[in-house]
Image (cartoon, helix red, strand yellow):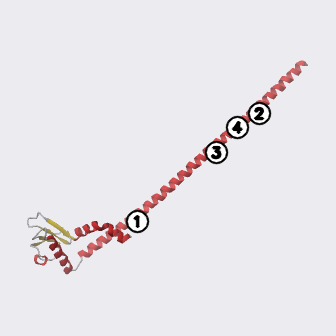
Amino acid sequence: MALDSVMREIQASAEASVAKIREEQAAEIDAINRQTDAQIAKMKEAQDKKVAEAKETLDRQERSSAELESRKLVLAKKKELLSQVFESALADLESAPREKKLAYYKAMVASAKSIIPEPKAVISENDDFTAADLGVRSVEKDARVSSGLMLQSEDGLVEVDMQFSVILQGIWDKNLKQLSDILFG
């Protein structure tokens, strides 16, 4: 009997030890689960923050891209309008009545005489002005001249290009900023 009693005591002690180990194990598992849950929550919070920042960055980039595209469209339209204004001004000069063109040409010749005293005029095939009309030494017609005229020295070394397109382009380039401000505010 004494052996029975010792065995029961050993068994009870073993069961108590097992229960204690299980209790410690359960507490350790709970601690690990809490620690893991805390790490997961921290990682999720960090990831959510990164996602929010990435979304904000993408939104800014998208807005910026849309604004840039909008500006490009507006600038393209402005450029198109400026080109139309240039073409319209050139067309008005080219289609001016004969008397008005003659007045323009005489003014061109007078301004160029300080460079070329007795110039030769090269004019469009569509114009019918004489040397006497323009106040020049001679007149030649050339298909390369669309409107306006070119003045040359007798030896051909000095040439002043006074075609309407060249003069208008020079004025245009010089005053483009002012033109843009006037047209587009």
Mark 1 and mark 3 in contact? Answer it, CB < 8 Å: no
Question: Which element is circle 1 on?
Answer: helix
Q: Which of marks 3 and 4 is nearer the N terminus?
A: 4
Name the amino acid type tagged 3.
Answer: Ala
Left or right: where does residue 87 sit relative to residue 144?
right
Rendered-image quadrant of the N terminus: top right
Name the amino acid type tagged 1.
Answer: Val
Q: Which residue is drawn at 61% across and 47% down?
A: 45
- Say few, some or many: other residues with alpha carbon within 10 Å of mark 3 (under 14 / 14 to 19 / 20 or more): few
- Say few, some or many: other residues with alpha carbon within 10 Å of mark 2 (under 14 / 14 to 19 / 20 or more): few
Query: Which of the two residues, 37 or 178, is positioned nearer the viewer here?
Result: 178
Q: Which of marks 2 and 1 is nearer the N terminus?
A: 2
Mark 2 and mark 1 in contact? Answer it, CB < 8 Å: no
Q: Which residue is drawn at 40% across and 65% down?
A: 74
Q: Earlier in the sequence, mark 1 or mark 4?
A: 4
Query: Which of the two residues, 18 or 115, is positioned nearer the viewer here?
Result: 115
Mark 2 and mark 4 in contact? Answer it, CB < 8 Å: no
Residue lying furthest right: 1
For disc 1, the marked residue is 74
Q: Earlier in the sequence, mark 1 or mark 3?
A: 3
Q: Distance between the residues labelled 2 and 4?
A: 12 Å
For disc 3, the marked residue is 41
Q: Position of residue 160 (x, y in %)?
A: 16, 67
Residue 142 image-quadrant placement: bottom left
Q: Distance between the residues labelled 2 and 1?
A: 75 Å
Question: Which element is circle 2 on?
Answer: helix
Rendered-image quadrant of the C terminus: bottom left
Name the amino acid type tagged 4.
Answer: Ala
- Say few, some or many: other residues with alpha carbon within 10 Å of mark 1 (under 14 / 14 to 19 / 20 or more): few
Name the amino acid type tagged 2.
Answer: Glu
Left or right: where does residue 37 sit relative to residue 145?
right
The disc at residue 31 is: 4
